Structure formats: structure tokens, C-alpha cells
């Protein structure tokens, strides 16, 4: 009887014990769990909890925002070389290069001897309207000194840029004067051009140099083509050397001008991003124009998309050296504080199926960043046989063989020009002495130089000034000892470099490009292709139908 009674109350007793255990467990969890994180937790929650604990319990005050700014780039760096975090203060500067314009004063400058020197003044920009001249030294901004070892390009840009219609007061020392003169500049929109040169290489061949793919690249291209049409061009060179890329859509729009209808320009695909094809619409006005595209190891992203589309569709001849190999697609995502990340969500593929992206090891940015130097060391800049094709073979529409594994390999390889190269020239160029000399010479002779308004006039004047000897004396005073035999061997290189920088400082980007192209082996190879009517790739004999 007693045993039956005990069995009857046992479930009730066990339930009571469980209830008491839950209450006690909750009590201790609420009061003592602050010293440790949950054992069962997701990675994102762990990170949030860690920041909360640091903010709540760390021995010293911590700027959590600053900690996050440092942590996020490290996380993204472990994914791939192009997923990046951009802090709120850097977003504007990062986006300006690809925008059609930005708000500022409108000058080009360089910093020499701890002083900001105005190299060029943009025509019709606020600085020109206020009275600034090339050669001026800006030593004060808004009443505060701006000289010394601590000034740099980033700080100068931050101080000179600003919202439209705001003012900035610049204290300037003009050449030949000692007194500081103040100029009040009202900031305004400064156009950012993608196309830096448009001119005729000869009676038949037009030339267009594109430095990046921004918001205005396509309309700029149409204007450039219209200009060349008025000058009667029958063939075209598009120079994408050192073009670091930009907007995909701009590259697709540009390719559309040269391709017939329904030709694949590029496609993207990722783990969560379904394949997306970009096709030509057939409305392009220059579908049958002989075309050559120039690339080198500095050509990346959107420039590789354009070059790859022309190559795989057998539309143009590609000349130069293998391109950079940047084929990862980033999606921009903003945070509420104004900062943002650019996260890789897909890869670019050329029409033949090649992935443009070169190989990389996640988290090994150092090795990835050294790739161009490694190519140089390996001899790829000097010999086509040194190019390493790490990917499989693909085929163009005509059946020509092209290779994956990163970048676009040109149809015609032109090695880097080493004629006249000496250790003296390398040291003069890499130390910055040639640039410093050219800047100083330009400033000291600006009044005389400004009387020559065209490239032929200025070039003829410079040829008479014996600038190489002047440079050698200048360099010797600054630690680069005279080496007569080497100077004689490198004479043409020294002249080209010195003259080109003076021409750039006195005229513009187009004049500089025109001068450089006169002795460029890549341009010479291009002219030969047009002369031989070889701009349109031909179908390999083995792939022709019998």
C-alpha cells in the first residue's frame, strides 16, 4: 500500500525537481554568463558579442568604429584581392575617378620640396577664373600654412575639394615674387574625362586613348569618333594601355559600337549570381571599321572585357603585352554610416569562355601584388615565349586559339623597348630626378615656354636647349654621378622623358601622348598592321572547310 502511494507521487516529484532546476539555471545564467560567450553561437554573433564585450568591459576606452574600420579589411582580404572596405571619409575620393565630374578648384598639382606646386590649371575652372596660374606655389589654405614635411596628396585633395559653391582662400607665392598673394576660389564642378587623346596618327588612321571606363566614357567616345570622322579616318586605334578599368556597362556600350547584332560581349557568373549575358544590339555605327586595340600589363577589368570581346569575336587585332588579369565582379553595398564594401559576387568571362581573372591565393595579397614585378623578372615583358599560360585553351569564333588563366594575351606581342637602357637611366628615372628637373625647368622658364602654343613649336624649341646636359649637371648636384658613356647610350631615352614632361606641363595630355607615340614601337607595329590590311583577324587554315 505504502509502495503504491510512493510510485503514485514519483512523477510529480520529478516534475518539481525539473522546474526547480530550470529556475536555478536561468538565475545563474542571467547573473553569471556575462564573463563568457554562448558555446552555441554563430560566427557573426560571436563578432558582435566580442565588440560588445570590448566596449563594455575593456580596461581602457576604445573607439569601436575605428576598431571596425581596421577589422573589416582584414576579413575581406581573406576572401580575394578585390573585395574591399572603404571608410566613409574615403568614399567620395574613391568614386570621383569614375564620375563625370567632381567639385573642387580645378588644378593639377605635385608636391616638391615640401610645397604644393600648381602644374596645370583646368580651362574655365574655378581656379583659372580666380586668377591662379601654372607654376604657382600654394603655401596657405584658408589662412593656415600648408607647407612642410607633413603635407601629402591626400591632405591636399581633402582641403581643396569640397561642396559646390563653397569657397576656399589660397595663399600663393608666384614665381619671381616673394609676397604671398591670396585668391578666393569658389568651388565648382570639374569635368573628369576618360578620353585623354583623340587625333590622327596619319592621313588614314585615327587614335583614341582611354584612361578608364567611367560614367561619361561612351558619350566621350561618340564625340571622339565624330571628330575623327570629320578628319576622314578609315581605320582606328583604341589605346587601353594602363587603363585600370571601371564600369562594366561603359565597356559593353563601347563594344556595341563595333560588333554586329547578337554577339556576346561578356558574361558574368558566380555561386549565387546566375549567369548574365551581355549581347550587342546591332546598332553600332562602326561594325566594319578596321580596328586595333592596344593593351599592356596595366590594362585591367573593363579594358580586358573590351579587348576580350574584340578578340574572341575576331573583330580586331590586339597588340601589346598581356593584360593585368582582373576578372572579379564587385557589388557595392553601403552601410548606414556612409562607409561601404565592394564584395566579389561573380567572375567575368569572355565570349569564348575564358575567365579573365588571374590565379590568386586567398589572403595572400603580397604575392598577388607582386605579380607584375614577377612577370618582369621572368622576362615576360621582353619575350612572348616567357608568357605562362596556366589555363586551358579556348577558341574564337574563327577557331583561333586563345588561353585562359588570367588576362588577355595579345595577337601581336611587342616587347618593352630596352634600346638605350642603362643603369644610369634607370636610376635617373626611378629616383624621380628626371621629373624634378623637368618640373623645375618648366617653372623657371614658364614665361618663355608659354609663347609656344603647339606641339611642333614647343618641340622645336626644346630641341635647341641642350636639356640633357642641363639635366646631367642637375643630377650630379643631387647625388647621381655623371657617367658619360651611359649618358651617350641613353641619350634618346633621356631626351624623350625630359621633353615629354615639359610638354605635359606646358600643353596638355593629348600633346604629351602625341609626342610619346612618335617613337613608340607599339604604334609602329600598329601602323604596319593597317598598312598590310591585317586588322581583321583571319580564320586559321586548319579550321577552314574543305
Image (cartoon, rainbow, N blue to C red):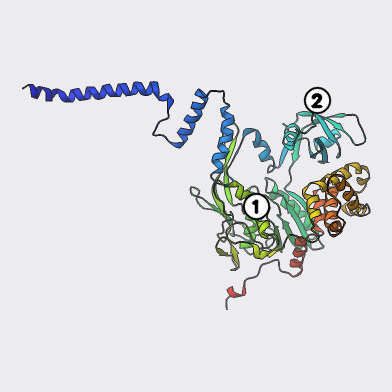
Q: Quadrant of the N terminus?
A: top left
Q: Quadrant of residue 287?
A: bottom right
Q: Which residue is mark 1?
A: 300
**Mark 1 burial class by Cα count in 10 Å: few <14, some 14-19, many 20+:** many
Residue 21 makes an appearance in the image = yes
Side (left or right) of 415 relative to 262? right
Q: Position of residue 452 (x, y in %)?
A: 91, 49
**Mark 2 burial class by Cα count in 10 Å: few <14, some 14-19, many 20+:** few
Viewer-proximal residue, 213 or 327? 327
Q: Quadrant of the C terminus?
A: bottom right
Looking at marks 1 and 2 on the same chain, the residue that comes earlier in the sequence is marked by 2
* 251 is higher (above) or lower (below) than 205: above
In percent of the image, x 69 and y 59: which residue is there?
A: 381
Q: Position of residue 486 (x, y in %)?
A: 84, 57
Viewer-proximal residue, 94 or 205? 94
- Regarding mark 1 in the picture, which secondary structure is present there? loop
Q: Which residue is mark 2?
A: 143
Farthest-out residue, bottom? 546
Side (left or right) of 145 relative to 465? left
- Regarding mark 2 in the picture, which secondary structure is present there? loop
* 108 is higher (above) or lower (below) than 237: above
Viewer-proximal residue, 482 or 371? 482
Amino acid at each position: 500500500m505504502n509502495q503504491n502511494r510512493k510510485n503514485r507521487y514519483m512523477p510529480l516529484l520529478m516534475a518539481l525537481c525539473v522546474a526547480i532546476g530550470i529556475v536555478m539555471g536561468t538565475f545563474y545564467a542571467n547573473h553569471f554568463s556575462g564573463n563568457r560567450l554562448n558555446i552555441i553561437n554563430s560566427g557573426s554573433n560571436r563578432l558582435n558579442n566580442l565588440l560588445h564585450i570590448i566596449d563594455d568591459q575593456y580596461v581602457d576606452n576604445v573607439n569601436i568604429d575605428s576598431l571596425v574600420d581596421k577589422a573589416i579589411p582584414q576579413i575581406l582580404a581573406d576572401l580575394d584581392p578585390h573585395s574591399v572596405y572603404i571608410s566613409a571619409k574615403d568614399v567620395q575620393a574613391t568614386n570621383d575617378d569614375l564620375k563625370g565630374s567632381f567639385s573642387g578648384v580645378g588644378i593639377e598639382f605635385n608636391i616638391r620640396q615640401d610645397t604644393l606646386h600648381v602644374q596645370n590649371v583646368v580651362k574655365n575652372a574655378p581656379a583659372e577664373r580666380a586668377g591662379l596660374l601654372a607654376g604657382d606655389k600654394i603655401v596657405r589654405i584658408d589662412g593656415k600654412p600648408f607647407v612642410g614635411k607633413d603635407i601629402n596628396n591626400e591632405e591636399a585633395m581633402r582641403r581643396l575639394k569640397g561642396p559646390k559653391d563653397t569657397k576656399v582662400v589660397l595663399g600663393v607665392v608666384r614665381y619671381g615674387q616673394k609676397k604671398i598673394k591670396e585668391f578666393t576660389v569658389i568651388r565648382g564642378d570639374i569635368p573628369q574625362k576618360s578620353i585623354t587623346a583623340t587625333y590622327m596618327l596619319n592621313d588614314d588612321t585615327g587614335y583614341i586613348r582611354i584612361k578608364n571606363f567611367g560614367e561619361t566614357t561612351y558619350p566621350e567616345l561618340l564625340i571622339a569618333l565624330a571628330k575623327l570622322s570629320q578628319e576622314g579616318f578609315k581605320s582606328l586605334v583604341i589605346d587601353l594601355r594602363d587603363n585600370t578599368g571601371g564600369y562594366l556597362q561603359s565597356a559593353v556600350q563601347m563594344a556595341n559600337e563595333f560588333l554586329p547584332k547578337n554577339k556576346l560581349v561578356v558574361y558574368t557568373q558566380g555561386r549565387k549570381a546566375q549567369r548574365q549575358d551581355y549581347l550587342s544590339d546591332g546598332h553600332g555605327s562602326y561594325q566594319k571599321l578596321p580596328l586595333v586595340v592596344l593593351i599592356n600589363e596595366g590594362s585591367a577589368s573593363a579594358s580586358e572585357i573590351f579587348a576580350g570581346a574584340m578578340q574572341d569575336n575576331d573583330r580586331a587585332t590586339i597588340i601589346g603585352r598581356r593584360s593585368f588579369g582582373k576578372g572579379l565582379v564587385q557589388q557595392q553595398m553601403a552601410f548606414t554610416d556612409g562607409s561601404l564594401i565592394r564584395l566579389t559576387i561573380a567572375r567575368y568571362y569572355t565570349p569564348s569562355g575564358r575567365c579573365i581573372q588571374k590565379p590568386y591565393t586567398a589572403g595572400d595579397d603580397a604575392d598577388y601584388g607582386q605579380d607584375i614585378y614577377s612577370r618582369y623578372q621572368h622576362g615576360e615583358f621582353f619575350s612572348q615565349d616567357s608568357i605562362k599560360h596556366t589555363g586551358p585553351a579556348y577558341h574564337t569564333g574563327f577557331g583561333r586559339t586563345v588561353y585562359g588563366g588570367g588576362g588577355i594575351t595579345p595577337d601581336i606581342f611587342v616587347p618593352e623597348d630596352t634600346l638605350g637602357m642603362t643603369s644610369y637611366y634607370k636610376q635617373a628615372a626611378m629616383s624621380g630626378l628626371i621629373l624634378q628637373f623637368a618640373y623645375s625647368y618648366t617653372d623657371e622658364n614658364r614665361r618663355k615656354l608659354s609663347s609656344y602654343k603647339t606641339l611642333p613649336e614647343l618641340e622645336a624649341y626644346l630641341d635647341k636647349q641642350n636639356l640633357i646636359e642641363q639635366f646631367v649637371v642637375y643630377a650630379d648636384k643631387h647625388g647621381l654621378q655623371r657617367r658619360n658613356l651611359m649618358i651617350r647610350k641613353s641619350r634618346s631615352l633621356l631626351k624623350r622623358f625630359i621633353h615629354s614632361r615639359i610638354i605635359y606641363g606646358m600643353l596638355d595630355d593629348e600633346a604629351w601622348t602625341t609626342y610619346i607615340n612618335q617613337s613608340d614601337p607599339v604604334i609602329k607595329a600598329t601602323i604596319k598592321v593597317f598598312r598590310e590590311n591585317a586588322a581583321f583577324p583571319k580564320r586559321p587554315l586548319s579550321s577552314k572547310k574543305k
